[in-house]
């Protein structure tokens, strides 16, 4: 399945969320169109699953979400759901 992460925080909304999502690397590996990672924005934070195909791409996506979370508070919790 992969490795799952839940970043507990108050997620960005509106234009800030749009800008955040634009920073994410492409979640698919071409030409095979393999999904490298997937995410969702929940009411209580960000959820990301790394499919363990290209860990550096998923790590970049995780860092984007962590940076966003830490931009609104000094600390966040990361759990494995």
Image (cartoon, rainbow, N blue to C red):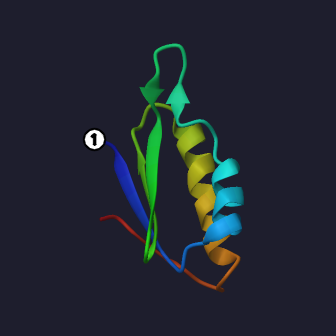
Residue 78 place in picture, x, y as percent: 45, 71
21 lies left or right of 5: right
37 lies left or right of 76: left
- Indicate the quadrant containing the N terminus: top left, top right, bottom left or bottom right: top left
Nearest the eye: 15 or 77: 15
Q: Residues within 10 Å of mark 1 (few under 14, many from 20)?
A: few
Residue 8 place in picture, x, y as percent: 46, 76
Residue at 63 percent across and 64 percent down: it is 17
For this orientation, the residue located farthest to the top is: 31
Count how many numbered circles sit on residues in the image: 1
Residue at 52 percent across and 39 percent down: it is 55
Residue 2 place in picture, x, y as percent: 33, 43
The answer to whether residue 67 is above or below residue 71 is above
Secondary structure under badge 1? loop
For this orientation, the residue located farthest to the front is: 14
- Indicate the quadrant containing the C terminus: top left, top right, bottom left or bottom right: bottom left
Q: Name the residue under label 1.
A: 1
The answer to whether residue 6 is above or below residue 4 is below
Residue 71 place in picture, x, y as percent: 71, 76
Residue at 47 percent across and 35 percent down: it is 36
Specify the quadrant of the image occupied by residue 26: top right
């Amino acid at each position: 399945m992969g490795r799952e992460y839940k970043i507990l925080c108050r997620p960005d909304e509106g234009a800030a969320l749009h800008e955040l999502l634009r920073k994410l690397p492409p979640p698919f590996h071409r030409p095979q169109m393999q999904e490298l990672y997937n995410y969702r924005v929940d009411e209580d934070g960000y959820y990301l699953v790394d499919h363990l195909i290209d860990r550096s791409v998923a790590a970049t996506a995780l860092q984007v979400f962590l940076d966003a979370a830490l931009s609104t508070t000094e600390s966040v919790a990361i759990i494995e759901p």
